[in-house]
Amino acid sequence: MFKSIFSKLFIVLLVQTFLFANADPLTSPMWDYVKKKFLNNEKTVFDTKNIKIKVPSFADNPLQVPIYVDASYFKEAQRLFIFADLNAIIPLIDIKLSGLKPIVSVNMKIAQGTPLRAAIKDKNGLWHIGSSEIKSFGGGCSVASNAGGLIDWESQIGKSKNKIFKIKDTYRIKLSIFHPMDTGLFIGNPEFYINKINIKQNNKIIAKIKTYASVSENPRLVFETKQGNGKYEINFNDTDGNEFIVKTKY
């Protein structure tokens, strides 16, 4: 009898643990929608411990909101996808990691305060979801870029800077590139943004990255890798068919 009661209690505890792990800690009204649309309704588990997300306590500049994600706990992570539930443009950056660590720094535009998600896909196909709340008055997605308003912006587009830092056995790749990153939500300004980035080492692609118009203008990006010797080729492609090649040197 006691064994039967214990077994039932154990099952109840397992069910409660499962439901708790799958309950959105930010109770977003959009969670079910974004999970279906962007994660194909695949299995997810919320993880507030192993995925570190840093955002400002209040984003007073909605055009440039710094985001930092560190999910290096997951040693065999396959993919890192960052998105914001309530943003006018929900996805931010989607990285097929390959040779990169699941660490990224990037600035984004936000239309309003929103939950921010960092989704890590492990080797078994399970999505681990880190969450943080961005507080802001918003309005950043529907404003024309400053870069696009410059008289000589066409001669500046694609100009870049990079710096490589070695930290123990890891190379940190720090990049910036001049680009308006227009969302198309401002009347008269068509959608025009960098949408693909490939990072190569010895002609081998170590990361395939999709970026979206929610990335801030003149993108500033930081990645980390254990591969290579500090010499990388980074290919940027935008929605207008332009390609920009950046070569780093340690």
Image (cartoon, rainbow, N blue to C red):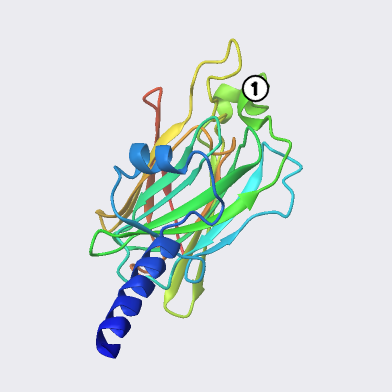
Q: Compared with residue 26, is residue 216 higher up or lower down, i.e. above or below? A: above
Q: Quadrant of residue 219?
A: top right
Comparing 211 with 153, the one in front is 211
Q: In the figure, 200 relative to 183: above or below?
A: below
Residue at the (63%, 32%) spot, across then down: 111
Q: What residue is rendered at 39% in x and 46% in y? A: 94
- 182 or 149, which is in the foreground? 182
> For numbered disc 1, what is the local secondary structure?
loop
Residue 130: x %, y % from top left: 49, 59
**Horizontal and vertical percent position of residue 38:** 36, 40
230 vs 37: above or below = below
- The answer, for residue 46, to whether it is visible in the render is no
| Residue 82 placement (x, y as % from top left) | 46, 49
Using a 10 Å C-alpha cutoff, classify the residue at mark 1 as few (fewer than 14 neighbours), some (14 to 19) or many (20 or more): many
Q: Residue furthest front?
A: 1
Q: Which residue, given by chain and number where applicable, does mark 1 sit on?
A: 144
Amino acid on which disc 1 is placed: Ala
